[in-house]
Image (cartoon, rainbow, N blue to C red):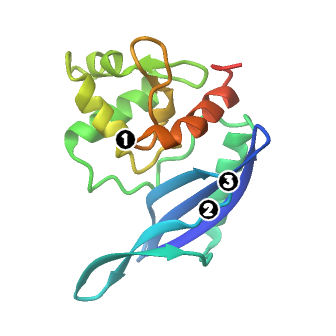
Amino acid sequence: MNVAVKNFRLAGSSISVALSWKKNPDFQIHSIDISMGKAVFPCPELVEGKPPINRRVETRHTCAEVDKYFSAIDSWFKGAARDLPTDNIFLERLSPFQKNILCELRSKVPAGKTISYGGLAKLAGYQGAARAVGTVMSSNPFPLVFPCHRVIRSDGSVGCFQGGEKGIPLKKALLENEGVIK
C-alpha cells in the first residue's frame, strides 16, 4: 500500500490529507484520512505473509493519478468543485449497508445542506437506524468523497467527526467551507 500526504489551507487552517492507494494494475484509492494541522497519519503496512501493522507515515509516495486527485481535493477545498470523483475509490471492503448509506448521502445531501443521522437512515430505507448510520459515518474510509461532515445530530448540533469529539473542529471547518456554519 502506498501513501501520499499533502497539506491544504481551509478557512485559515492547515488541513492534512493522506491517500492510501495501490496501482496494481489499476489505480485505486483505499482510504482518505484528513486531519487539522500538519499531521503524520497511522497507516497499515502490508507485509507479505504477515497481518497489517500500524506505523507512522512521513514519506510521500505519489503518481500522476494521486497528483490529479490532490488537485481535485484542492478545488473542493476552494469551493470550485462540490463532489470528488468516485471512479478510483475502492469500495469492495464495505458492506452493502455501508455502501447504501454512503451513496445515499453523496447523492441526496449536496454541499451547503445537512441531514440528521436519523434522517439519512430514513432516506436510505432504514427507518430507526440512526445509530447504525452514525457507526457508518464514524468509520467512513472516504470522508471527503462521501461527505459525512454533512450528517449532524437531530437537535441541530454538529455532533462528532471521525469517530470522536477530537474531529469536531475539522467538521465545523468543512461545514463552514460549504456555507452551513458562519
Question: Nearest the camera: 36 or 29?
Answer: 36
SS at mark 2 in the image: loop
Q: Is residue 45 above or below residue 131?
A: below
Rendering coords of residue 149 (x, y %)? 50, 32
User: Going by the image, does 45 lie left or right of 14?
Assistant: left
* Picture quadrant where residue 18 is located: bottom right
Q: CA distance from mark 3 to mark 1?
A: 20 Å
Residue that mark 3 sits on: 37
Amino acid tagged 1? Ser
The residue nearer to you, when weighing 34 against 163, is 163
**Residue occupying the far right of the picture:** 12
Say which quadrant the N terminus sits in: bottom left
Amino acid type shown at disc 3 = Gly
Name the residue located 44 percent from the left edge and 18 percent from the top edge: 115
Q: Do the numbered discs 3 and 1 sit on residues whose CB atoms are within 8 Å?
A: no
Whether label 2 touches label 3, CB < 8 Å: yes
Q: Residues within 10 Å of mark 1 (few under 14, many from 20)?
A: some
Residue 29 drawn at (x, y percent): 46, 61
Residue at image mark 1: 138
- Please provide percent x and percent y for residue 79: 72, 34
